Amino acid sequence: MASKRTALQLENEVDSGQPPTKSTKLVENDTASLNRDTRTQPDQGSDGGESQLLQIEEQVGDIFDAPENSVLIHACNCEGSWGAGIAAAFRKQYPKAFQKYKAHCKESSATQLRGTAYLIEPCEENDPPKHFIGCLFTSGGRGKTKDKPNAILERTAPAMRDLLRQIADVKGDRDVAEIRTCQINSGLFKVPWDKTKTALEEIRLESKGWPSTVIVYSRD
């Protein structure tokens, strides 16, 4: 009695150019069906449901003119400095948040901070304090010591993911209104905004509790 041919042997017949037998065709059909199933299988989040990508909306306006309990995000260095560009505007608007950011940088090295985020809860002397501040640590240094654009870009998505997790954690205690950001990395860090936007749009949300939309504000 002839021994049964394995699926691997049948596949080899297809690769070798031999005329396909009925069994060979069955293997081909099964393989094609498996490939179709794999391509159409949705990605799943940690809760077992279908995951979704982070949505990026772009608007023209003032990032600071945000509703109470909004999160305002900008990219930061790991040296504890908000000395120029949009960071200087954040320092002027939120001096107490700046002190918290500065202390956070002193507690950790640049190696530890790169690719992470720091969410600062409302702490200014407004009545009540209005905004959360989200710091994305995408570069170790600043000015001439800033990291290379490719390195900054590689750390942007991990930092934003870390921030989204932190925002999801506080949502149980208070309602977060909007998630706003400037065109991060595109100013003093010299990373083209379209590249950063692409990296953000590829972020998959880990759970339904994560914010699903970030609004990007620009002046023009």
Image: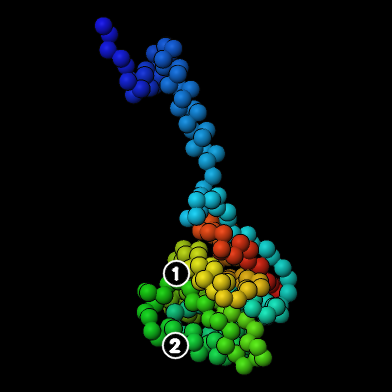
Percent coordinates x, y for residue 106 in the rendering? 40, 86
Q: Residues within 10 Å of mark 1 (few under 14, many from 20)?
A: many
Which secondary structure lies at badge 2? helix
Percent coordinates x, y for residue 42 in the rendering? 54, 44
Where is 19 relative to 206, above or below? above
The answer to whether one can see residue 153 in this image is no
Q: Which residue is mark 1?
A: 115
Q: Nearer the viewer, residue 118 or 195?
A: 118
Tally the marks. 2
Q: Quadrant of residue 187?
A: bottom right
* Residue at horizontal 39 percent and vertical 13 percent from the top: 18
Q: Amino acid at mark 2?
A: Ala
Residue 155 relative to residue 94: left or right: left
The answer to whether one can see residue 132 in this image is yes
Where is 162 relative to 102, above or below? above
* Residue at horizontal 44 percent and vertical 69 percent from the top: 115
* Residue at horizontal 55 percent and vertical 39 percent from the top: 40
Q: Are marks 1 and 2 in contact (CB under 8 Å)?
A: no
Q: Quadrant of the C terminus?
A: bottom right
Where is 143 relative to 185, above or below? below
Q: Nearer the viewer, mark 1 or mark 2?
A: 2
Q: Which residue is mark 2?
A: 103
Q: Quadrant of the N terminus?
A: top left
* Residue at horizontal 64 percent and vertical 76 percent from the top: 70
Say which label, 1 or 2, has the lower sequence index.
2
